[in-house]
Image (cartoon, rainbow, N blue to C red):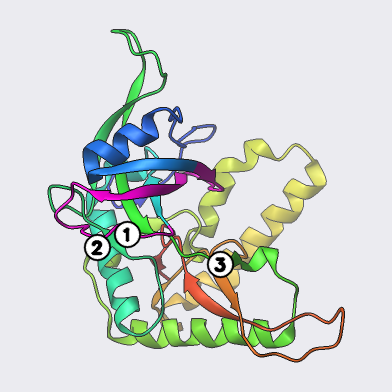
Amino acid sequence: MADQNDTMQAVGETIKPVVPMKHIPHLIKSLYGLTVESCKELDSYDDRNYHVIVTGQSENPYIKHPEKDGYVLKIMNKMQSKNPLFVEALHTLMNHVAKNEISVPHIMKNIKGEDMSLEKIYHSENITDSTPFEFYIVRLFTYIPAETFSAIPMHPKSLYNIGKVLGNFHEAMKDFHHKFFDSYTLLWSLSEVGRVQNFFIGVQDKNKKALVTEIIDAFNKEVVPKYHKLTKSIIHGDVNERNIIMKEIPGQKVASGEPRVYDVSALIDFNDAVSS
């Protein structure tokens, strides 16, 4: 049996959930006691994320006043859905980050008072005895209305503001510990570079394959023996332009056509967090 703390995706394996849009209002109603007015799927690599706007009525004792900006329903990929301990560790991490004045989406409780639930989701709208299905972990987060970093004009001061928040994040990690991360491994972690060779089947160009092989060999020779000398900490693991929510700093006076400065509104998507 594979180690549940080891998230190694098989070559060619598809792990992104198959979820007909028709199922979303039912999930929101049955799990969170909210009624969907509108629903839009958001970009996501391995999971399914939906921005849902709900009515002002709630049958959930843990959500007395539904958010006007709506929520993000997150259906986790089938690989990580098999590891609820990972999700519990993520929630602990996010709560710790929030306590250190770094904005992150707030985790909402379902009608049972739980932060997450494992749900059987059919892959088709028309359900019969032969309809395929999978079990996925389902969660609900507050929606943060702002732009992702990918959608705003580039400005050095905006980049500085991102760096400042990430510095605060790593400072906050100095007093954070969760035993799950002590043994958890992730393919995208630098410590797992050697395992990338298992995916060489996807590289057809001989020159490119030779280049990647050379880099991995150099990493194994020059870096791996020095692991014990390097500082180790929990990192976000996926701070890209779509996982940083930005807001324009008000009151700016800039020349026509010049980019405005933005500050970080929130960090999102902690699924690749790892000790590295």
Residue shown at 41%/22% (left/top)?
A: 123
Check the image and name the residue furthest to the right.
256
Q: Residue furthest front?
A: 56
The quadrant where residue 211 appears: bottom right
**Residue 228 x/y as whole percent:** 41, 79
- Residue under circle 3? 146
The answer to which quarter of the image holds residue 193 is bottom right
Q: Nearer the viewer, residue 191 or 173?
A: 173
- How busy is the neighbourhood of tag 2: few (under 14 within 10 Å), some, or many (20 plus)? some
Is 61 in the magenta? yes
What residue is at 75 percent from the left and 50 percent from the top? 210
Dot 3: within a 10 Å radius of its alpha carbon, few (fewer than 14), some, or many (20 or more) residues? some
Dot 2: what SS?
Answer: helix
Residue carrying label 1: 184
Q: CA distance from mark 1 to mark 3?
A: 32 Å
Whole-percent x and y of residue 237? 48, 66
| Amino acid type, residue under disc 1 in the picture | Tyr
Name the kind of residue labelled 2 in the image. Phe
Q: Which residues are magenta?
A: 40-69
Q: Which residue is mark 2?
A: 180
Mark 1, secondary structure of its residue:
loop
The reply to whether residue 145 is in sight is: yes
**Disc 1 crowd, CA 10 A, few/some/many (<14, 14-19, 20+):** some
For residue 234, side relative to residue 120 (left or right): right
Relative image position of residue 239 (x, y in whole percent): 54, 68
